[in-house]
Amino acid sequence: MIREVLTYPNKLLRTKSSDVEKFDEELHTLLDDMYDTMMAENGVGLAAIQIGIPLNALIINLPNEEDFQDKEDLIEAINPVITHKDGVQVFVEGCLSVPGFNEEVKRAEHIIVEYYNRHGEKLTMECEDFLAVAWQHEMEHLTGHLFIENLSITKRKKFEKEWKKKHKNKN
């Protein structure tokens, strides 16, 4: 089922999510709905809080070489923790919760993440480049942060100004 994606400045997006304790049917439904929602919105990642559920759950599905998001490549991560990060990369990011805005963000180039799958099995993933960016971006949502908070003061002010102008015209 496709759910509504919360958009900035919705206060719920500032909520710090809690760990998932039950790996049950309810969690599976949430993950399935997150996938349907992400695909409907043409996203590559989604955190549960973005659909108003303050749980430490996120999904990532990057396009492959054919620019196709294969469900076989879907990552469903419950209670993820970054155990290592190094290097620096700058990547232009966007966010379903901040539609129509993209900007360069500096993040770690290489990370190791520990997380659980939907069945409660513990997994470890080592990644770099775009996948590392996606992980870090989605995990920020779990702590109640948005990528725009990583921007320099100047870029942040520019964003706020453009955002207000764009959304004033919609009302």
Image (cartoon, helix red, strand yellow):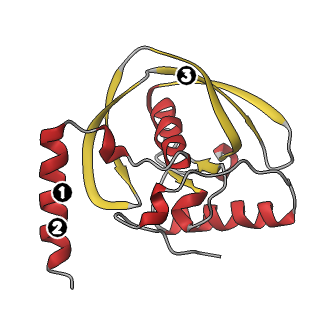
User: How many residues crowd around disc 1 within 10 Å: few (fewer than 14), some, or many (20 or more)?
Assistant: few
Up-down relation of residue 136 to residue 102 (above or below): above
* Viewer-nearest residue: 22 or 70: 22
| The C terminus lies in quadrant | bottom left
Which amino acid type is marked by label 1? Glu
Nearer to us of marks 3 and 2 is 2
**Helix, strand or loop under label 2:** helix
Q: Position of residue 56 (x, y in %)?
A: 66, 49
What's the residue at 65%, 32% (across, down)? 81
Q: Is residue 134 visible?
A: yes
**Quarter residue 108 falls in:** top left
Q: Which residue is mark 3?
A: 111
**Helix, strand or loop under label 3:** strand
| The N terminus lies in quadrant | bottom right
Nearer to us of marks 3 and 1 is 1
Which amino acid type is marked by label 2? Lys
Q: CA distance from mark 3 to mark 2?
A: 35 Å
What's the residue at 51%, 33% (across, down)? 131
- Left or right of 137 on screen, residue 169: left
Q: Position of residue 51 (x, y in %)?
A: 55, 67
Which amino acid type is marked by label 3? Ile
Q: Which mark is residue 164?
A: 2
Query: How many numbered dots are placed on residues in this image?
Result: 3
Q: CA distance from mark 3 to mark 1?
A: 30 Å
What's the residue at 66%, 68% (across, down)? 33
Q: Which residue is mark 1?
A: 160
* Viewer-nearest residue: 93 or 142: 142
User: How many residues crowd around disc 2 within 10 Å: few (fewer than 14), some, or many (20 or more)?
Assistant: few
Up-down relation of residue 95 to residue 147 (above or below): below
- Left or right of 132 on screen, residue 90: left
Q: Is residue 93 visible?
A: no
